[in-house]
Image (spheres, helix red, strand yellow):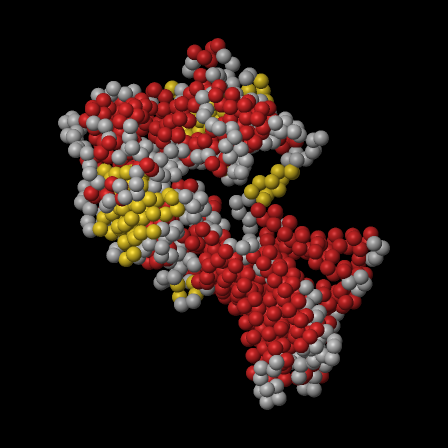
Amino acid sequence: MKIPYPVLLKRTEDSPKWLPVVTSVGAVLLAFIISGVILAVTGADPFKVYSYLFKASFGSWGAFSDVVVKATPLLLIGLGCSLAFRMRLWNIGAEGQFFVGAFMASAVVMVPLVNLDTTPRWAIISLMAALGMLGGSLYAFIAGFLKAKLNINEIIITLMLNYIAVLWNNYWIFGKWSESGFQMTKTFPKSAWLPRLADYAKQVPAFSGMTLHLGILFGLIAAVIVYLIIYRSKWGYKITLIGDNPRAARYAGINITANTILVFMVSGALAGLAGMTEVSGVVHRLQERISTSYGFSGVIVAWLAKLNPFAVIVVSILFGALLVASREIQPSGISFLIQGITLFLVISSDVFLKYEIKWVRPAQETAQ
Amino acid sequence: MTFPEETNTVPAVEMQDIVLRFPGVLANDHVNFTLYPGEIHALLGENGAGKSTLMNVLTGLYKPQSGEIRIHGKKVSFNSPRDAIANGIGMVHQHFMLVENQTVTENILIGLDTPRFALNLKKYDQEISNLAEQFGIHIDPTAKIWQLSVGEQQRVEILKILYRGANILIMDEPTAVLAPQEADELIETLKGMAAQGKSIAFISHKLTEVKQVADKLTVLRRGRVTAERVNLQDFTRESLASLMVGREVIFNLHKCEQTAGREVLRLEDISALNNKNLPALRNVDLALHEGEILGIAGVAGNGQSELVEVITGLRPCTGRIWLEGKDIANKPPSFSINQGLAHIPEDRIGVGSAPNLSLTSNIIMKRYDQQPVSQKWQLDYVAADELADGLKTEYDIQAPSVQTQARKLSGGNLQKLILARELSSTPRMVVAMQPTRGLDVGAIESVQQMLLNQREQGCAILLVSEDLDELLSLSDRIAVMYEGQIVGVLGSEDFYITQIGLMMTGTLPEELPEKAQAEEDLTEGNYSSFDEVLDNLHNYEESSQAKRPAEIEPSSESAEPIEEIPQPEPPAPPEDLPLNLTEKERVLRKVLGENYKQGDEE
């Protein structure tokens, strides 16, 4: 059988700067169209569903505050993944690093490491954040070390370490720290809570009921720092160089072992901080379900943002909106369906960046 | 123009008025190409002249915008390489497409419709060994690809297309990856195949080998034919070069007389393993001085790559390496870089550059940590761009801007980029491996001149090359490597290609045949070709039952510091041969075949 219009793929030498943005936005739009078709087939009215989704996440300030709360861990994890992916280190272990970060932050309260009644709130929170980052980075160190020294596939290690981290947390919440037999710790005292907008409802009535917490500020600061690292610093140059050609980097005198471990640890620290913001800013205790696979969604966020830290902010808010909306519609899987289709299309859309696509018409073949 | 065969035979290939336009480039501009059965037809041109493009049209990879192709007189239109194969056209690419872990036979059978299900390997082994024998190709069909040398892998590629019934063979720069001996063997094979009626198109930009192998010649320059189906005898090397480049090429490099200064690098008892954990370097001792080019000659795979990697800190070793009084053995690459060691790597794309990063990023690879590019923790991209821009002009790197990705550069420009990075840091020492391989004539000239300029500035240069021409014209001394050992070091007064050739096959200097006799034969023109010289050398070798270093205990002569290797009593060179550079070249040309005499007479 002969295809009437054969498609010709040609590698393009130059693509305009706006093209990546157009293809990404196009891919997201197309994802909504395809999901819409699926919704229509299952008997729902896609326009109604989408308008409801939109209202549920952006319809009011309160809803938007919820969106940002969901976006915070995605932002931090997405930034960490962006950094690691720049160096072509496939850290799929953000989920595990997130849990270890949450565990370490909880330890401040549960052990307790400081006197919770007398220590000032800012000191407790700082300690929790520091330990959360330390936990995430040490956990990522395991994978980084094995990758750098023994060249063991980091995807397998980080993936497996995720399960270990979840079970480690379970050990503590089912056993030692269990709140009268429930699979959770006791609620943290207020001094271990990240400040929320709702806390200031007395001064600003509009803030009443808003769950937005200080974690988002951590995320925004981290975005700026990661941006500076990638685009302005010598270290970022080294990371990019190793990512593009490790053999050339080694030839240029760059220590690949040390940088692999370091990038893994920074990536893990950001995931660990995300874990800390969740326990301290949202659930106020360590429990089984603190993550709705933030660790994996963060990977998708980083990809969608093409590893650009500022784009990570936008994408994590979009994903946060989908998560909030998923609470509002049934089945909640619709949101994940859209997420999956989006990722698929964004990755596929890379073909437009690398190739020029031509439909060869028979007329063209004979033309001069 | 009428050639005798044109009146009798139908051409195997006739390409007429081929036009192929890529965005922004006219790759083939009304190109004609005709190939007769039993003929070896060279397609000569610089990189980017359109040779490979033209042949890719013939193999069905590209579709020309206009023009006609006739195969054995029948008009054809190929839509895919499959169509070309069906018409008996096969191409051996520069980069082999073989499965490392499978045998020769399995590789040849890949993708064929038969055998369908059950694979009776023995039967096919036999078939392939018969086919190989028919064309005088030596290969073991049961060997796994990874066990084979590059030359042998190439033979597998040739067998692959012969097995598919090709009678028109296209060889894309086949000798670029081969050692001189392997190249000679390949040329013999090709001549044998032509004698049996196969037509061969031979893409090359090496003038020397084109004169050796081809019957007819077509020259391309910037997509146009500058000489069509001419006889090779009518051209000198110089006139061919000017057809290729479009201007007179001066083959004389400016190499001034100078004496070497104090010692810069010393290797003491260096041994190292290769990637397969087999000994690659055995007790190597070497010394290198200021203002000196030390050439390393040897057949590929005798430890040259490992030697370079050990010096540049990319491979662990035992022994000591002194660079300017500091031991750099087993130190990270950054250590020797800071000591002023520049490295022009063999693999420009895989090691020497970051293909997807900009020119600027590639230029600052080794100085991102120095002023003015570096500002505390920051990298000053404006200063980096300025630096890159300056070097782009100074080293004449042809690229739209310093933001251009390195992978978009042509081979010659990429090498200039690497040279700009390595040489602009005023190194104390340069390690250059195959610095001109695969470059076109114009680029070769400028790269070689840059190395000579470094020498003049007192830099010590270690030049590893498989191009004996290059070694002879650039080096002050030549060390010959065989199976991981330095067989001997020759001073410029001992530069005879016969000696070097013999040592490359493992003959120790004191076992060399009477030099005077060998050289006399050469200068009298008793040999008509390089092959004959080589044959003769092998005879010498057999008769003297040369002892190979591999059989020698590690503590033998070659383990001593090389200066102390007992040199054979140097017989006085023939008196009509003063040994300055141009005379050496004259000797070389005589050695390389009678065709050279024409170029010589001017």
Residue drawn at the location 62% of the way across and 59% of the way down: A159
Is the residue A232 above or below the residue B34 in the image? below
Residue A109 in view of the camera = yes
Q: Residue at x 73, y 59 (%)?
A: A336
Q: Nearer the viewer, residue A76 or A101?
A: A101
Q: Is residue B293 visible?
A: no
Q: Is residue A62 left or right of residue A90?
A: right
Q: Position of residue B573 (x, y in %)?
A: 17, 29
Q: Quadrant of the C terminus of chain A?
A: top right
Q: Position of residue B262 (x, y in %)?
A: 20, 51
Say which of A360 and B119 sits in front: B119
Q: Nearer the viewer, residue A263 or B352?
A: A263
Task: In the rendered view, tell whether residue B485 sits above or below residue B379.
Answer: above
In the image as oriented, which residue stretches furthest toward the top?
B8
Most extreme residue toward the right is A43
User: In the picture shown, does residue A67 fall above or below B209?
Assistant: below
